[in-house]
Image (tube, rainbow, N blue to C red):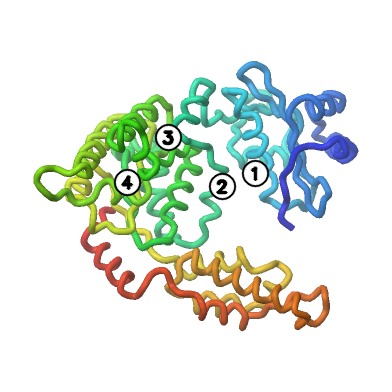
Amino acid sequence: MTARIRDFHDDDLDTIVRLWEAAYHRGTPPVYSMAEVIASCQQDHAMVATENDQVVAVAVGRAAHAQGWIVFFDVAPDTDPNAAGLLLDALERRMAPLGLGKLSVLTSGDDDASAALSDNGFTVRDPVRYLERPMPVQRRELDLLKEVGGRLLPRHLWDRVSGMRQEKDMLEQRLVTPLARPDMAERFGVTPPHAVMLFGPPGTGKTTFAKAVASRLDWPFVELFPSRLADSPGGLAGALRSSFEAIAELEHAVVFIDEVEEIASQRRGDPPSPTQGVTNELLKQVAEFRDQDGRLLVCATNFVRSLDDAFLRHGRFDYVIPIGLPDAEARTAIWGRYIPDTVIATIDVDALTEASTGMTPADIEYAARRASQDALARALDGEGTAEDEVGLGTADYLTALRATRATVSRGAAAEFSEDIDTYARL
């Protein structure tokens, strides 16, 4: 059962008291008294996780100047293992506008709640059991991050990218590890990357990978939209310059530009066109961006062939990485995400995985949702059997697949293979 996260309600107090008492009796008494926990639930910041409308986990926070404290955190036995991470992320987002420098916890010993905290980025400080993790954005950066349209992404996005093991391993080795562990990179003589290009057919997950890298690094994610920047009074080139200057004030950031071919296409013509001026400005900004530590520029394109030659030259981008169609493992995971739990045990997912070869994640989502919608329509028309049955079978999904047009044609897939040989730099 997937846990749901919501704000604390006064009606939850009885369950929270029971969780506090259970923690006390199992030998790991909460550091804060029950009265303090109740007061913080009502006056400070409290989030709960529920399953079947029953509270199964609670996280209560209190702010003291720039320090945030988790007053009480506990998870009931046999709860969805993802609930702890989702709950802690929700509490952090709730408290982030307070401009906290750290979020800390005091515990009285090792238990499942302490393990969940450790799994979600908190580190132990001896001699007491003191856990903390830095806030991704400091107080002085909050307004600036809002100004540039940046945001903090939920943790664990990386783990939710199923399959695509080769691509994930490459991004982990080339991008994440050198940036997250610069001391280790220095020992091996590896220079942390500053800019990377992702290319591949539409819908293959380039944006998803960019967000997953930001989540893995625990850095703010700033997406620049050329179409929106073009509406700025100073024009696209001026807006690009202003955006990069503002981003330079952040301590860390993953900057993402999708469909970068819109502003970095092949320069042609005499005299220079306005587009050439924008490309020149972007090339200048990439060069300056590379002089700043703690930042990563990720550009993505569906048409790598259309990019200006100078844009892909060595010294601009550390890596040019192909992102192709989902492999079998990824397709299986995508189907599992959209097939209802009530019927998945009766579905031949392996057959669907095989039948969806060559499909993008969006194609598979469309087919799955179409099959579900058709089944609902049949039930409403009275074609179903029992009212509580869901008339969905493998054949329904295969029928929906046959009616789904693949985003990536065979010709486009063949061109992508050629582009890997021509442009990939790993």
Kindly check if marks 4 and 2 are in contact, taking CB atoms under 8 A apart as contact. no
Give the label on residue 85, or none: 1
Kindly check if marks 3 and 4 are in contact, taking CB atoms under 8 A apart as contact. no
Name above or below for residue 194 compared with residue 63: below
In terms of depth relative to the viewer, which is nearer, 76 or 284?
A: 284
The image position of residue 360, as x and y in percent, is 45, 66
Q: Which of marks 2 and 1 is nearer the N terminus?
A: 1
Kindly check if marks 1 and 4 are in contact, taking CB atoms under 8 A apart as contact. no
State how far apart marks 3 and 4 are (Cα). 14 Å
Residue at coordinates 52% horizontally, 69% vertically from top-left? 364
State how far apart marks 1 and 3 are (Cα). 22 Å
Kindly check if marks 1 and 3 are in contact, taking CB atoms under 8 A apart as contact. no
In front of the other: label 3 or label 2?
3
Residue linked to disc 3: 253
State how far apart marks 3 and 2 are (Cα). 17 Å
In front of the other: label 1 or label 4?
4
State how far apart marks 1 and 4 are (Cα). 29 Å
Q: In which quarter of the image is residue 250?
A: top left
Kindly check if marks 2 and 1 are in contact, taking CB atoms under 8 A apart as contact. yes
Report the number of discs. 4
Q: Is residue 260 left or right of residue 86?
A: left
Q: What element carries label 2?
A: loop
Query: Most extreme residue toward the top, as rendered?
Result: 65
Residue at coordinates 34% horizontally, 29% vertically from top-left? 242
Q: What element carries label 3?
A: strand
Give the label on residue 196, or none: 4
